[in-house]
Image: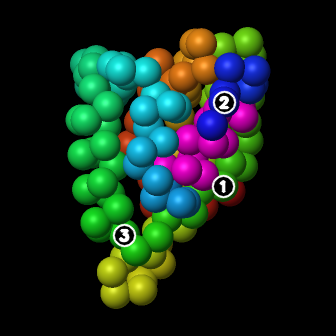
Amino acid sequence: MTLSNSSPAEIVDQYTEQIYHQRNLNALETLVADPMIRHEPDGSRVALTIEEATHRIASLHQQFRSMRFTNRKLIEDHESVATAYEADLVDQNGEVSTICGIEIFTIREGQITEVWNAPAGSGSWG
């Protein structure tokens, strides 16, 4: 997977497709910087290694049989992507719930280096 000539939006699309839709956690090594900084809404910054990011996302995969993300609105500049997303989450019993939220990614040298992610809300965007 060569991403050096990809736009920030293409890298975020690959991240979503590989990590969440295809459940290919090995793709984190290519798509995400080590460490990657997560900006939390409580004012903290968390530096996640690839191993820590893998563990965090693997725990989500254990909770849900599948996750399907759709970007309802995407804004991109030379190194950032902001997306208003919706996700259909299917739990282990087959129950579907929909969440929505906003994420902002910073991409440098073909990898996601930072992400801002507030807690998602229930339901779809209006």
Q: Does the residue at mark 3 contact the one at mark 2 (Cβ under 8 Å)?
A: no
Quadrant (top left/top right/bottom left/bottom right) for the C terminus: bottom right
Seen at 36% across and 20% down, the residue is 34
Q: Secondary structure at mark 3?
A: strand
89 horizontally vs 53: left or right? right
Q: Pointer 2: what residue? A: 2
Q: Is residue 24 magenta?
A: no
Quarter of the rendering containing residue 104: top right
Seen at 73% across and 12% down, the residue is 78
Q: Secondary structure at mark 1?
A: strand
113 horizontally vs 14: left or right? left
Q: Residues within 10 Å of mark 1 (few under 14, many from 20)?
A: some
Q: What's the magenta region?
A: 9-19
Quarter of the rendering containing residue 10: top right
Q: Pointer 3: what residue? A: 64
How far apart marks 3 and 2 lie (CA) works out to: 29 Å
How far apart marks 1 and 2 lie (CA) works out to: 23 Å
Instruction: Look at the magenta stretch and give its main secondary structure.
Output: helix
- Residue 38 in percent (x, y) is at 36, 25
Q: Does the residue at mark 1 contact the one at mark 3 (Cβ under 8 Å)?
A: no
